[in-house]
Structures are given as C-alpha cells and as structure tokens.
Amino acid sequence: MKNIFIRRILFLLSIVLIGACSNNETGQTVSITNNKVKVEFQLTENGQPSYSVFYDDAQVIKPSLLGIDFKNQAALYDQFEIIKRSSFAKNEQWEMPWGEQRFVQNNYVETRIELQEKINLRRKLNLVFRVYEDGIGFRYEFPIQENMGEVFITEEQTEFNLTDDHDVWWGPGDWDIYEHLYSHTKFSEIDATAFRNHPSLGQTHIPFNAVNTPVTMRTEDGLHLSFHEAALVDYSGMTLKVDTLNMTMKSVLVGSRNNDFKVAQKVPFHTPWRTIQISETAGALITSNLIVNLNEPSKIEDVSWFKPMKYTGIWWEMHLGKSSWDVAAGKHGATTENTKAFIDFSAKNNIGGVLVEGWNTGWEHWIGFEDREGVFDFVTPYPDYDLKEVVRYGKEKGVAIIMHHETSAATETYAKQQDTAYALMQSLGIHSVKTGYVGKILPKGEYHHGQYMVNHYNNAVEKAAKYQVAINAHEPIKATGLRRTYPNTISREGVRGQEFNAWSSDGGNPPAHLPIVAFTRMLAGPIDYTPGIFDIKFDQYKKDNQVNTTIAQQLALYVVIYSPIQMAADLIENYVGNPALQFIKDVGVDWEQSKVLNGEIGEFVTIAREERGTGNWFVGGISNEEPRDVIINFDFLPKDAIFEAIIYKDGATAHWDKNPLDLSIEKIALTHTSIRKIHIAAGGGFAISIIKK
Ligand code: NOJ
Ligand code: CA
C-alpha cells in the first residue's frame, strides 16, 4: 500500500517536471519533448495550426499545416487562437493476451492544445499530440460546442512536409485493396498511377498519385521514418497524396461514390491518430509499440477462449486448381473425408487448427457476379460436408475447425447473418473465422477502405466477441492497432499474400517482397501471410507459377512474419516425409519477447523470438535476391542454460529459382556465448529452433 502511494507521488512529480522542463509555451508556440523526439506546434500569422517534428535536434518534418474541410460549413483551417493547453506524462505497462511480446511499455507525454476561432462561429478544435521516444501520434478532437453538431467531412488537410528527397518503400494508395507489390524509389519518383488496373485484382481504385500506409522512408542521414494511423474507428482510411515537386504528403481520405463527403460524424468525436515512427535502425521500427499503444485498452474482459495456433487447411489446393471451392466443378475440396485427413495430419504434427474453405453453398455464384447479395448464408454446408462430424472428430484429436465466411463483399447479407453465423459457431465450440471480401463492395459505390467499410469490419469484430469468436479478415481494412482494444481481431491479410504465387499473371511475389513487408505492412499488425510452401515449383498444377523463395525462407517466415495464427499452407502430401516439417512442428506462435537481430529495408532481416511458457527460442532470417552471410550472436539467450538447436539453412547450391529445395539441417548445442556465421542464398533464409535442455 505504502509502495503504491510513493509511486503515485513520484509519478505526479514527473508530470510536473516534464511540464516545467520539456514543454514551454512562447506566444503561440508549444513544444513537446520526449527524449530525442520533439514536436513544435505553432499558429501561423493567420492563425493556421502547424506542427513540425525534430529528432535529436534535427528537423525531420518541416512545418506542416493542419485543417479539416466540411460539406455543411466553412473549413476549420485558420483564424485560431490557443485558448488552453494541458500536458501530462504517462508511464504504464500493459500485458498482451498474446503477441510479439508479453509486456508492453507505454510511456509518452501528451499535450492537448485547445483552439478557438477568433471570428465568425468561434468554433473549437483540439489538437492532441502524444510524443514517444520513438515517434509521435496526433489527432483532431471536436469538443461539444454550440456551432457544430453533425458534420460531413469532405477532406482532412493534414500535411507531412519532408525535409528531403528520401528513399521510400511504398504501395499505391488504392481505395479498395492493399494487395500490391511495394516499390522502392526516391520520394520524387513515386508514381502510384502505374499500378492502376492490375489484372489479378477483382477490385482496385487508385484515383491519385498517393500511397497507402504504413509508408516507410530512410533519410540521407540513415534515420528511418514510417507514417501510418492508429485507432481507425468510425472514420475513413487515410491515403497520402504525394507532391513529388515539393516533397510533401497530404492526407486524402477514402471516399464513396454515394456521398459528396467522406466522413459523417457528430460532435464530440475525434479522428484516428496520425502517426510517425522514428528510429535510428530499421529493426527498431519493427519492435516499436507506438501503433498499439495509441489504442484503448482491451474492451473484452475474457479472451481465454482463443489460443494462438498453427493451422493447416483446405485452401492452397484450390489456389493451385487441384480442387475447387464449389461442388459443380466436380472436384470439391471441402469434403468430410478431406477435412478428416487434414485433422489427422495436424494432430500428428502439433498443429492446432484446420481451415476449411468452400464448405458452404453458394460458391457456384461467387466471383464476377453483380447480384451477390443473398448468395452465401454461412450456415448451410454442401451435402458432402458434415460440419458437426468434422467438429466432433477434430475435438477427439485435439484439433479445432476454423470457420470460413467469404462474404464476396456482399456486406448487407453478411451483416444480417452475423448473429446466426456466430451463434452456430459458438454452439459448435468454433472460436475463429477467416472472413473474405473479394470483389467490389455491395452496396455499390462503397470502397473497402471508406467509413462505411471501416464500420462494417469493426462491427463484425465487436459482434463476434460476444459469441467468443475471433476474426482473421482477408481483403480487410488496414491494421491500426485495434487488436489492443479488441484482441479477437487476431490477424488479417491486407498484403499481397502467398496466394499470388499460385496464380498471379505477373510472376508472383519477388524475393524482395517480404524483406519490404517486414518494415512496412508488418508495422501495422499481424499478417496472415500463409507460409510453409515446400513444393516451391508445383509443376504438377501450375507450370508457369512458383514461390520465389527457397524452402529455408518458407521456414524462416514463421518467425519473421508475426501472427498468432500461422498456416502450414502446403498440401499434406508435400509435407509427409520431409525433415523440414520438424521445424513447423516445433515452432512457437506466441511470444514472451522478440528481438530484431539485424535488417535493412528491402534487403534482409533476422528476428529472434522467445516462446511464452517454454523458454525456447526461434530465429528466422530472410534475404532478398542477394545472397549474403549474416553473423548471429546468441547473446540474447539466458546465461545459465544450454540449448539444443537445429539450424535449417540454404544448402551450398540453393537459389530461389535454380535450386529452391537445397536445404541443410544441422543439430548443434548453443549457449549465450555462441556466435555463428550463416549463409543465406539468393531469395533464401534460415530458421533455427533453440530448445531448452
Ligand atoms: C481471398 C483470400 O485472400 C483467400 O485466402 C481466399 O482463399 C479467397 N479469398 C476465397 O475466400
Ligand atoms: Ca486476398
């Protein structure tokens, strides 16, 4: 009791000190500092809000304007004065129910700047800045006031003025899908319009030369910046329009063809956080918790009903064309018998779940149809699939069935049926579902990333929680750290996934894809990438397609790409008898802590993770098309222990295209003093299981 009292006094004292030392207000300028990161907020001569950001006293964001445009009233833009300013410091730790680490430190300085127009309607707007040691978040807050009620936002005028022509890793600002390749160019060379009309995408809309977030940059001085948003709730997703002449990005919210505004809201409300992560090393972007920290604590009291797991599934076989989702094609994949084979295989190999796609009626009328509402009902199995029986059989073997709801983007049908569908799952003891939103959104005119869909995705997660159901959404809205508030939003796609290797007409995902994804998309949250393809060339099914990595890299992905559900995506027959399967059997899915051992964006990255509960460690490293040697220092292992390790690495002649299956497996003893040089082939990787003796 006494202890708590003393800590409380110390904490209050720290707020006062921060207020006195770090934040000083000169006239209409406010500066907010946390260690090396500083935000300077100012009102311009005509009372326009503007902010700039410094790292270690060097400017990283030049003065950038802030403002909001409305349909039903004048823009909130200028003629402001600061009427109040308040600050506090927060220093807390919270626990992730599952994640890349157990404990998360959330330390920041928050300053709320209350503005009011000096003229006309004297409307009020608050700007809230949270300054962390590794970046910042800020948002607009609209307090209750007389002259503002219901608002229709037509645009958010948030600027990010860059200091130079940085190196940028970016994906196009598509309003309908994130499944594009990333590019690496100078900022001045960004051309997102080149990605229009991709032949393998059922929905795509790139109206401007804009990028989607997270977008990551490296400055001439080697500083790393990543721009994104946190806590995207009841608002539109933000793309960033690039001005390649002036080195500026400006927010463009995703719109709707049905409305002449982009966001409808009622005061009081606030926007999502606009975030800038700042780090000296590329790896520190990955271990930053800024995005999750900017979200509210969990609203779900008990999530013990969900457990992180590896899973297999009736999935890759459809993407290869071995079987089909629908029955009419005559090679239906989702049969009771096939599912039982996956259950048997999973039970034998320490894999907790089986995903079954194509189990419910309607797949004959799935893709390319205008009239998609009412096609799928999420409760009616095809006659050759006995849902109750596979669930029973799975339980007997300790393997969970993972439900699948492909909505075909017919959102009204899905919203109407969610209660029934989730109740069925709960009655069967099924606790997770993969959802899908392939195709153009119905109702027509909406885009996947607009306010309508943001609400649809978030409502699904909230509703599912009531039925103890966790969601892994494909064709989702971007991750913005909401997994802190709703841990049952377990994973998502929102990336060009493994499936593109099976069928895309542009050569699949090149070796540099995942070394970029680790420093861009992965900063937003867990990814259901679906690794573990052993039959890299799959010539039996698709002669013109292949996976563009070595088999060793496929193993590494279980560690490098974080998700609390990790698929062993290949066909059962490609695993049986392959000694590399041992790694998938052993690898953890839930982590006590994670360390990025090395990495450069788009080139290579090595991550080590300690499994919760066992003290075992797993390491994964991947490279782009460049072969390279990496030195791994095992000093992250505890001092007092001896570990038995198995290293799965590229063989001497391995190459992602010429010899992807060349794999070397070596058993060694490891301690915290061990240091090893490991060779990674072109498009290769390595995976190490480090088991406590
Ligand atoms: C797209 C998803 O990304 C994929 O994994 C799934 O198999 C299909 N939709 C069918 O739902
Ligand atoms: Ca997809």
Image (cartoon, rainbow, N blue to C red):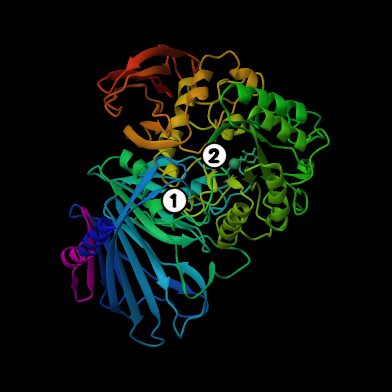
The residue range painted magenta reads 14-37
Q: Which residue sits at x=67%, y=32%?
A: 395
Q: Say what secondary structure mark 1 lies in.
A: loop
19 part of magenta stretch:
yes
Q: Say what secondary structure mark 2 lies in.
A: loop
Residue 341: % across, % down:
70, 24
Residue 371 lies, with reference to residue 505, above or below; the image says below
> Ligand 1 falls in which quarter?
top right
Q: Label 1 is placed on what type of residue? A: Thr
User: Where the C terminus falls, by quadrant?
Assistant: top left
Q: Residue furthest bottom?
A: 120
The residue that label 2 is drawn on is 307
Question: Mark on residue 213?
Answer: 1
Residue 139: % across, % down:
39, 65
Q: Which residue sits at x=19%, y=76%?
A: 27
Query: Which picture quadrant has residue 52?
Result: bottom left
User: Where the N terminus falls, by quadrant?
Assistant: bottom left
Residue 105: % across, % down:
33, 49
Q: Which residue sits at x=64%, y=61%?
A: 445
